[in-house]
Structure formats: C-alpha cells, structure tokens
Image (tube, rainbow, N blue to C red):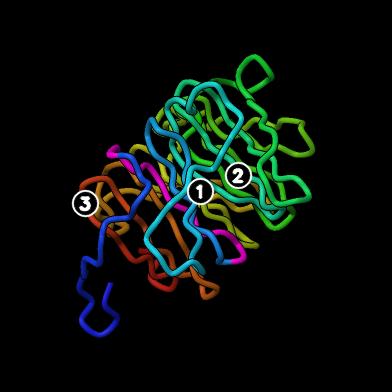
Amino acid sequence: LEHDTHSLRFISPMEGLPETKIQDMALSRDKRTLYILTMDEGIFAYKISAHNMKAEPLGLDMENPIEGPQQLFEDADGNLWIPTFGNGLYKLVRDQDGAFSSWINISERSGLPGDNVKFVMQDREQNMWLGMFGTGLVRLVDEAYTYYFLDHPDIDNNFHAIYMNQQEAWFGTETGLIRLDRATGDYHELSGPEYGLPFGRVTAISGSPEGELWIGTRGNGIFHWDPGQER
C-alpha cells in the first residue's frame, strides 16, 4: 500500500507458498516474522529481515495440516493459537530456543462447549478469550474454562470478532455488534441504521485509545465508530 497515493502496488509473488487460499496473517510481536496461515497447507513464516520474498514452512511435527483454520494469533509468550471450524483450538508452544516444538489441541472432548471456534484473543491480564460459533464465549484462565452464553431471543451466540479495552468488550456477531460493560456485565446490541451499521456479520473489530472503533463487515465494507455520537 503506497502511503502517499493510498493505492496498492504489486511487488512480486512470494516464493515458497503453495497455490492455495491464505486464511490469515499475523506479524510477530517483535516485528521480525510474518506468519502466514493457509487453508489446507499449514503455516509458513516470512523473515522480514531477510529482505527477500521467500517463506518457509513452520516445521511443525504434525502428521496432517490443521483442518478448518480460521485465524492466527500470537500470545504474549510467543505461542501461536489457531481456532478452527470443526476441530476446536490449537496452541503451538514455543520452546526456549524459539522453535515450536509441541502443540496442544483444546476441543469439546477437553471441556469446550463445541468444536467450532471462530476467534481468539488475549486480554491485558493474559486470559485467552474464544469466540464460539453458536455456543457463546469462553474465557480460558490457567487451563480452566468460564462460559458466557447470552440468553436473549434476539441475540445470537455466533461470535466472529472480539475487541477489548479497560472498560468495555466488543463482539462481532452475525447481525452486528454487542457491547459489554466489563464492570457490571451489562450488554447491549448495536445493529442497524440507528447506529450507522448494516444488519449483517461483523468480521473484524479494532480500536484506538480514544475509544474509536473500526468495524469490518462481510460484504458491506469498513465502518468507523465515533464514541461521542454513539454511532
């Protein structure tokens, strides 16, 4: 993306990547590695300091690629988390040498309310939050689970995106946004023209320290949330 013209410029294809769908990408916290998640060919790593356009397989000791991957997330310890549709959640554990030497699968058999996980994130207290498809929210604290299911006929429990600040938590659903007050537990659905939003799936949420939000939707573009106007 060109900064001055705000236009995209094609540089060159990246070597080493298979010809398949790229499901997600994540820049490491030290900004040295770009992790690339493919739909059915595993995970690749691009070393930014190498100054070439070549990606290498992550080199996981797994018989088969992770099926149904949805997202790629690096936690504060450098571990990688991959939620899947149909196979629960995978955690790739980084060892002291910086290699991903082991992995863990967390699924319905180990306590999750389902195997369809759409999104994962980590809050300031380093708790992991999972957005489930149809079965609500899960907070993972020291390998123990806490479940949240919004028992309201007009609110679905299909979560596609999560964003948190110190006061509030925002969730993207099939029909719009849900805002949760982290102190009281009260929540409110924000959907439709009244809030400047379409009725439809929210797929991504990002925010600023000033309380602004950028909301990505499926098929309806990106929206900017002004906290002063509540829309």
Residue pictured at 61% horizontal, 66% vertical: 30
Q: Residue 231, image x and y in percent?
A: 35, 63
Q: Residue 105, image x and y in percent?
A: 63, 26
| Pick the front one: 217 or 170 | 217
**70 magenta-colored:** no
Give the vertical position of 10 relative to 5 (above or below). above
Q: What's the amino acid at mark 1?
A: Ile
| Pick the front one: 56 or 155 | 56
SS for dot 2: strand
Give the vertical position of 179 relative to 11 (above or below). above
Residue picked out by circle 3? 220
Locate the N terminus and report the quarter of the image it occupies. bottom left
Give whichever of discs 2 and 3 has the lower sequence position: 2
| Pick the front one: 104 or 219 | 104
Residue picked out by circle 1? 162
Q: Nearer the viewer, mark 2 or mark 3?
A: 2
How crowded pointer 2 is (Cα within 10 Å; few <14, some 14-19, many 20+) is rated as many
**24 magenta-colored:** yes
Give whichever of discs 3 and 1 has the lower sequence position: 1
Residue 176 visible in the snapshot: no
Residue pictured at 61% horizontal, 17% vertical: 108
Q: Nearer the viewer, mark 1 or mark 2?
A: 2
Q: Residue 42, image x and y in percent?
A: 45, 35
Q: Residue 221, image x and y in percent?
A: 23, 56
Magenta segment range?
Answer: 19-30
Q: What's the amino acid at mark 2?
A: Leu
